[in-house]
Image: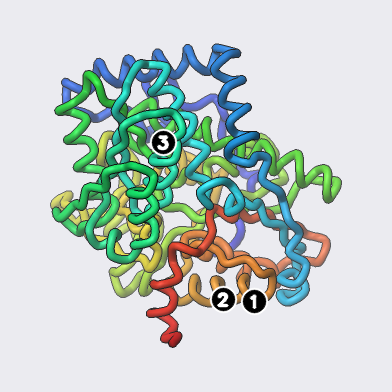
Amino acid sequence: MTTPDPTIRVASTDVPDERGYFGPFGGRFVPETLVPALDELEAAYRAAMADPTFQAELAHLQHSYTGRPTPVSYAKRLSEHLGGAQIYLKREDLAHTGAHKINNALGQALLAKRMGKQRVIAETGAGQHGVASATAAALLGLDCHVYMGSVDMARQRPNVFRMKLLGAEVIPVESGSKTLKDAINESIRDWVTNVRDTFYLLGSALGPHPYPMMVRDFQSVIGIEARQQILDQAGRLPDLCIACVGGGSNAIGLFHAFRADEGVALLGVEAGGRGIDSGEHAARFADPTISRPGVLQGTRSYVMQNEDGQILNTHSISAGLDYASVGPEHAYLRQTERAGYTIATDDDALAAFRLLSELEGIIPALETAHAVAEVIKQAPKLPKEAMILVNLSGRGDKDLDTVIEALGFD
């Protein structure tokens, strides 16, 4: 896939609309019992974002607790090795808990406390959102319950232990494919049952309105920082921003600050798994025969489904990208041609995982390695004066068991 030309059409940043739609995507498709809760959440969120006291508390915690701003690092050896564009890394792996997930978890946990909700629930795939939610809950004195598919629990054991150590209850999900989609299903069921006293701390830029907007806004600190940092370091904006896309929170967090910059291309990288032809992947935009607009877990976006509308099983070596749908704003950015989307296979991600580790001393999360894999493809095609900014969404400690097994290390 070629890098998208962002000058074709620039999507408006004035989304979502009042009903929560990003063009034809988004909205709110939920049981009637959740409508009042979502109305309450949206009203509380808008009031909090307009409250200087809330904003000041969040900014203080981002700085003193999360460790923001995270740096932008020039990847000198990787740039030289690839022999093309100059590569810069936005280091979300250096945020507290080791990933971008803490940005949203901390914002939503503060909102839960403001709303008087003592109990929070969360879903998690790779475990990083679960860890971030448990961390924020511990900091603010909230009761935390995390739903996690048993398949993901087996491949993310360190994060399961971290959540428990932080005081959260980790609830295994044995239904369906036992991965992220099923963890979200159980979280929604819990919320429907306990809606009066429970806050659903959703981890990605999906779900019913206002979650895609809310998660994007809490994650937009990534792009806001990165845009100023790259200007300070390099004197101009990058030519291309790259991020991995599962639900899409780290990517939308990076992309949002650059959307009005017509000279900056945006490229998201989905999980190609064992290849598109194998059918074992989680690439929602790559194969129109199995992925088309539909409704899943409260929102309208692209969904991997069969001809009867049944949700298909997905596969990725990275638990955080192993999901059958994608955030509605990403579907909108693709439709308006403001962003392009491509894939990296499991093998691509493993090769990128090793290369970044060996050349830069940075062990990335397997999710992040998908974005790095696309950098490896793109950089040699571009002139040396070109600049690529890639979001390092998380660190790879959690994936070492998976990588050891996949690469056959002793």
Mark 3 sits on what residue? Answer: 138
| Up-down relation of residue 366 to residue 266 (above or below) | below
Q: Residues within 10 Å of mark 3 (few under 14, many from 20)?
A: some
Tag in front: 2 or 3: 3
Q: CA distance from mark 2 to mark 3?
A: 34 Å
Q: Are marks 1 and 2 in contact (CB under 8 Å)?
A: yes
| Up-down relation of residue 104 to residue 284 (above or below) | above
Whether residue 134 sits left or right of residue 393 in the image: it is left
Residue 331 rendering spot, x and y as whole percentages? 43, 43
Q: Amino acid at mark 3?
A: Ala
Q: Residue at x 68, y 54 (%)?
A: 389
Whether residue 84 sits left or right of residue 393 in the image: it is right
Q: Which sits earlier in the primary sequence, circle 2 or circle 3?
A: 3
Residue 257 rendering spot, x and y as whole percentages? 64, 36
Q: CA distance from mark 1 to mark 2?
A: 6 Å
Q: CA distance from mark 3 to mark 1?
A: 35 Å
Q: Are marks 2 and 3 in contact (CB under 8 Å)?
A: no
Residue 130 rendering spot, x and y as whole percentages? 37, 46
Mark 1 sits on what residue? Answer: 358
Residue 34's image quarter?
A: top left
Mark 2 sits on what residue? Answer: 354
Q: Callout 1: helix, strand or loop?
A: helix
> Which residue is nearer to you in this view: 366 or 22?
366
